[in-house]
Image: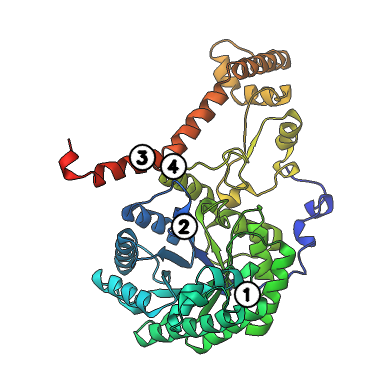
């Protein structure tokens, strides 16, 4: 309806409180999609290379800028995926400006194997970005890759525990920069680089890692919250210092996990601190609690902060969510923000009465922005006003069978709706559906018993077979 007063006088626009938050120019922001790599690492999810191509087409069309393919040197499936995506890009099935990323560890051997994997499927190094990564926190440096660093320096394993953390830091810098220079010398034009566990590492060490990596020929430093422990306050503390030290001309990449449900706001905080590239996955799929959900961060940026990413097709978000559910076999929770099946549904009488007047009375996210339509669900909490609205909407259809619409009829129908809904609840149909859903999800991956059975079948001595 048309309000007599400007809507801005009736309710506060959320951007009143965020208007002073500054971001990089939206034209410089880069959506870095990790659906094909980190998203697939969610237990139970597995895509074929052909399925990954279909996913890539959807993501390219919706407007992501960068796409992580994974480890073509370590997995034949990733190698085939790279081949399919490179061919699709040449054909024009993927956007010409879509950047493809392949990953490898920070050593010359991994780079050589990755180059060989590219060559095997006819992809030139200039067609992709290499993400050369190492570790970054002292915990990782000494206790995860410490022996690797000792071997690189020609030291024995016996010195592992007694060698101070400062030595591992220095050796890691040398190995990492050596790998970046090696990749550039082998014809790789774009090297993204970074260290795991940034959110638990020393900020000054990461600043040195980024400076040295840029000097060695890297182009995009990546800073991750590998285990999802950051708060918005910690994110601002780290990211503002990194941006100040590295400078605004370098595109810094963030990578957040959602272990505490803070991935989206941490991502936004990082961008408000000056980072320009941000990692997401479709539907937020990923290890443990997942990654930054694409739908959450881009919609919040647009609606709550006024940051409109040029060329991004917000209206495709819900269609993308349904597509990804079918591809992965993992449905979203019904009340998932923005793309959940129920977030634009209303049943409560108080809410539906307000929505019948104007949807802005209870609408949080503009439905048309994300390709949704508001609709009503009839049940225990429905009011007679909503039921009468439905009857009036279909008044001609009811008249065909001799039923006249009236407020009295609406009251009687409302009582019957409530009775039927409670009857269905008594049958515990929802519990049956949940159990089936859990069983189906458990069947997506292989169980430990299935692994043992495979080992028995493969490893059984020939003379005992049969």
**Alpha-carbon distance for marks 3 and 4?**
20 Å
Q: Which residue occupies the extreme front position in the image?
A: 158
Kindly indicate whether the residue at mark 4 contacts the one at mark 3 (C-beta within 8 angstroms): no
Q: Which residue occupies the extreme top position in the image?
A: 402
The tag on residue 35 is 2
Q: Nearer the viewer, residue 310 or 171?
A: 171
Residue 342 is situated, as x and y percent measured from the top left of the image, at 60, 37
**Alpha-carbon distance for marks 1 and 2?**
25 Å
Which of discs 3 and 4 lies nearer the camera? The answer is 3
Residue bearing mark 3: 450
Q: Residue at x 50, y 34 (%)?
A: 438
User: Tag 4: Cα neighbours inside 10 Å, few (<14), some, or many (≥20)?
Assistant: some
Q: Earlier in the sequence, mark 1 or mark 2?
A: 1
User: Tag 1: Cα neighbours inside 10 Å, few (<14), some, or many (≥20)?
Assistant: few
Which of discs 3 and 2 lies nearer the camera? The answer is 3
Q: As drawn, is 287 to the left or to the right of 89?
A: right
């Amino acid at each position: 309806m048309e309000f007599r007063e400007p809507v801005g006088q009736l309710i506060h626009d959320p951007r009143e409180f965020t208007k002073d938050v500054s971001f990089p120019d939206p034209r410089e922001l880069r959506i870095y999609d990790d659906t094909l790599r980190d998203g697939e690492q969610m237990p139970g999810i597995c895509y074929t290379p052909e399925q990954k191509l279909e996913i890539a087409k959807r993501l390219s069309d919706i407007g992501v800028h960068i796409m992580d393919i994974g480890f073509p040197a370590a997995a034949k499936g990733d190698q085939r995926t790279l081949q399919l995506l490179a061919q699709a890009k040449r054909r024009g099935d993927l956007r010409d400006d879509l950047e493809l990323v392949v990953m490898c560890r920070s050593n010359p051997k991994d780079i050589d194997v990755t180059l060989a994997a590219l060559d095997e499927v006819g992809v030139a190094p200039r067609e992709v970005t290499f993400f050369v990564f190492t570790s970054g926190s002292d915990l990782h440096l000494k206790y995860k890759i410490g022996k690797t660093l000792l071997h690189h320096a020609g030291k024995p394993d016996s010195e592992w525990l007694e060698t101070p953390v400062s030595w591992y830091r220095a050796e890691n810098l040398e190995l990492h920069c050596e790998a970046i220079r090696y990749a550039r010398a082998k014809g790789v034009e774009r090297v993204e680089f970074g260290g795991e566990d940034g959110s638990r590492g020393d900020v000054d060490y990461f600043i040195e890692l980024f400076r040295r990596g840029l000097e060695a020929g890297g182009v995009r430093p990546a800073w991750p919250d590998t285990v999802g422990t950051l708060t918005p306050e910690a994110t601002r503390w780290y990211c503002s210092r990194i941006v100040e030290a590295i400078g605004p001309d370098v595109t810094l990449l963030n990578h957040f996990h959602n272990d505490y449900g803070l991935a989206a706001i941490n991502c936004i905080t990082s961008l408000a601190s000056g980072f320009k590239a941000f990692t997401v996955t479709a539907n937020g799929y990923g290890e443990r609690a997942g990654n930054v959900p694409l739908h959450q961060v881009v919609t919040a940026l647009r609606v709550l902060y006024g940051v409109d990413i040029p060329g991004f097709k917000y209206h495709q978000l819900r269609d993308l969510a349904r597509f990804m559910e079918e591809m992965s076999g993992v449905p979203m929770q019904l009340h998932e923000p923005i793309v959940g099946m129920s977030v634009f549904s209303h049943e409560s009488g108080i809410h539906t009465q307000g929505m019948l007047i104007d949807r802005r009375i209870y609408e949080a996210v503009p439905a048309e922005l994300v390709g949704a339509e508001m609709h009503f669900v009839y049940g225990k909490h429905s009011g007679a006003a909503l039921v009468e609205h439905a009857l009036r909407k279909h008044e001609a259809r009811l008249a065909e069978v001799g039923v006249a619409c009236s407020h009295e009829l609406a009251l009687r129908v409302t009582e019957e709706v409530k009775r039927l809904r409670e009857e269905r609840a008594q049958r515990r149909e929802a519990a049956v559906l949940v159990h089936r859903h859990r069983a189906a999800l458990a069947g997506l991956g292989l169980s430990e018993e299935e692994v043992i059975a495979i080992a028995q079948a493969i490893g059984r001595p020939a003379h005992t077979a049969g």
